[in-house]
Amino acid sequence: MTVLSPRPDLWTLDPDVVHLNHGSWGAVPRRTQEVLASLRAEAEANPMVWFRSVPERLTAARLELAAFLEADPAGFALVPNASAGITAAFATVPISSHIVTTSHVYGASRFAAERVARASGAELRVVDLPMQADDATIVALIEPQLTGACALLVDHVSAATGTILPIARLVELAHTYDVPVIVDGAHAPALIDAPTGDGADFWTGNFHKWPSAPRATAGLVVAEKWRTAAYPLITSWSEYDERLPERFDMQGTQDYAAWIAAPESLRVLADLEWSVRRPQITAMLEEGARLVAKALGTSVGEVANPAPTLRLVELPIFVADAEPFKQHLSRELQIEITLTGFEGRSFIRLSAHAYNTPECYQKLSEGLPRVLA
Ligand SMILES: Cc1ncc(COP(=O)(O)O)c(C=O)c1O
């Protein structure tokens, strides 16, 4: 099998910094940045001509993005981010009784559930899923809460632990209880193939994470039965368009360049031979995570079904306030990581992308014990 070389040259990341947190904000390759800059220059050369061209260009970009997910284009809408997708989904589903979610849920998505629960006098039930829970355990723990529920909100890939949840099984189960399912797939595009195919009522995912699209590019996939009821968060000129994707396209005066440039990043992934490269990146990350854990005298987080490019390494100390810790590492070591806390334990969440090399993890394993000493 061909071993593909890391390609930091395709990004413009500061070479003096070790970037091990693609998961939070992504990073846009040089080629996409150039397309984006040239689209913005076009817009500034003649805003009238630019805005006239936007609807057609948005359609083309949207179709490419839907095809990347293997989603039905008639049910695929552009949204700025997964948070917007979740909010739009909760604005569509009738809320009464109780909403079910899990202890893995992303904080902002949980807030969206809390907001609609508050407004409707509904309850939010949070099912505790142990970090190492496998698919059968996850399904068994969620099922008892589904009777009489009005919605189930689940992550496709949990930000807290990197766990891939068994979406197909959960959707099938929830539908036997007539419970609509909202999937927070923020991390799923490029990590899970055909991630929207499990029949969820709503699925949302970010292109600005693993596919490295320009920021504020995400998709919302809506099942057929909800397509006439789902509306974007901004009321604008397409309010009465009967087609779901077009209703979400033009959201007033905005910078549409990111959405139009996003397919360039999909072409970068294709040129990187992403499907061949991804398992190689996983192997590098697993080796790197073991190295860091060994240097710390801890272990790699025991996640049953981890996403290919995220791994947890336990810290020997509990970090109550993550931000000062991250900033300290950034200043002292020029290493960017993120932290996650789960079940009262603190972990570094390591990412891997095509620009990372084994040396990135080596440097972390050398520097971190010094900083913690
Ligand atoms: C699981 C999960 N859901 C939702 C989000 C929110 O994504 P965004 O900030 O693009 O709305 C994130 C961001 O990291 C996430 O990890």
Image (cartoon, grey):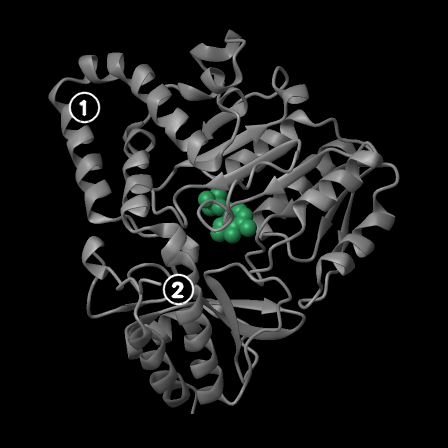
Q: Residue furthest bottom?
A: 373
The reply to whether the residue tagged 1 has its Cβ within 8 angstroms of ligand 1 is no
List the residue tagged with mark 1: 43
User: What percent of the width, then of the height, locates residue 22?
Assistant: 38, 58
Residue at image location 11% in from the left, 22% down from the top: 45
Q: Quadrant of residue 324?
A: bottom left
In the image, residue 213 above or below residue 287 = above
What secondary structure is marked by label 2? helix
User: What percent of the width, then of the height, locates residue 265?
Assistant: 30, 42
The amino acid beneath tag 1 is Ala
Q: In the visual, does 2 lie left or right of 295?
A: left
User: What percent of the width, then of the height, locates residue 114?
Assistant: 68, 43
Q: Quadrant of residue 213?
A: top left
List the residue tagged with mark 2: 280
The amino acid beneath tag 2 is Gln
Residue 214 appears in the figure: no
Q: In the visual, does 80 lie left or right of 117?
A: left
- Distance from the alpha carbon under mark 1 to that under mark 2: 40 Å
Label 1 or label 2, whichever lies nearer to me, is 2
In the image, residue 197 above or below residue 157 = above
Residue at image location 34% in from the left, 81% down from the top: 362
What secondary structure is marked by label 1? helix
